[in-house]
Image: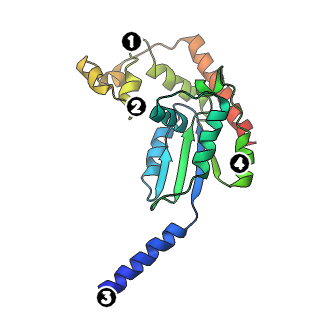
Amino acid sequence: RALRLAVTLAAARAALQRAPCEHFIILKYAHTGSTWFVDELNGIDRFHVIEEFLMERFKESGELPKSSTDIKDHFVEALTRECRGDTRVIGLSQNPAHHTLTRPPIGPFDWSFLAELQRRKPFHVILWYRSNVVSRAIGLINEYRPGMEFCHRLKDPNSTQWKRIEEAGHHLRDCRKSRFAVEKERFLRSITWGLCEIAMYHRLAD
């Protein structure tokens, strides 16, 4: 009986490893809950999702991207790579509005290569954003208000600065209790930028 069970498990594992390798990319913008979303996806068995793919990739190498072709090659490699071990789904998340992709010398980055790549090797594209741009604008102002800049670092799960911040006498509870005034110009600018990002994401979807 034990031998039969071992053979069954081995066959199941072999079948799993023969299953097709799925790929997807999440195009998202900041302060939309995407970090939580990626964490939840990584909690699913056989999923491997890389948060802020481009930044993580160049953080590993210690070099900045040299050109748009350099960036494109990294995305193509990740969206076409073979699954290893028990992993059956490979995902990436990336903010298309990141300054590296929107400002010179590399930006504005052309995402049209994704459509061509999809025709050659299908993968899924997920758009992740908050349609309530007012709520997002308030969240941005709350997080980066004067004197409370440390708040977003304490909330960032990848931050390595939390110990130094807490030793300086700052705590997450201070972020929740502190009141702040909304600057009209900055508030309207955040709303406008949110609407522009949503429009950009819809163009990417088309």
Mark 4: secondary structure? helix
Q: Tag count in the figure? A: 4
Amino acid type shown at disc 2: Asp
- Residue picked out by circle 2: 156
- Which of pointers 4 and 1 lies earlier in the amino acid sequence? 4
Q: Position of residue 129 (x, y in %)?
A: 59, 37
Amino acid type shown at disc 3: Arg
Q: Disc 1, disc 3: CB below 8 Å?
A: no
- Residue picked out by circle 4: 117
Residue displayed at 44% across by 45% down: 39
Q: Position of residue 178 (x, y in %)?
A: 36, 18
Q: Is residue 127 visible?
A: no
- Which of pointers 1 and 3 lies earlier in the amino acid sequence? 3
The colour scheme used to paint the residues is rainbow
Judged by depth in the image, the label closer to the viewer, 3 or 2, is 3
Separation of disc 4 and disc 2 at Cα? 33 Å
> Camera-side residue: 166 or 178?
166
> Camera-side residue: 155 or 110?
110
Q: Position of residue 98 (x, y in %)?
A: 58, 27
- Which of pointers 3 and 2 lies earlier in the amino acid sequence? 3
Separation of disc 4 and disc 1 at Cα? 46 Å
Residue displayed at 53% across by 35% down: 32
Judged by depth in the image, the label closer to the viewer, 4 or 1, is 4
Mark 1: secondary structure? loop
- Residue picked out by circle 3: 1
Q: Position of residue 128 (x, y in %)?
A: 59, 40
Mark 3: secondary structure? loop
Question: In the drawing, what numbered circle is on residue 147?
Answer: 1
Residue displayed at 49% across by 26% down: 139
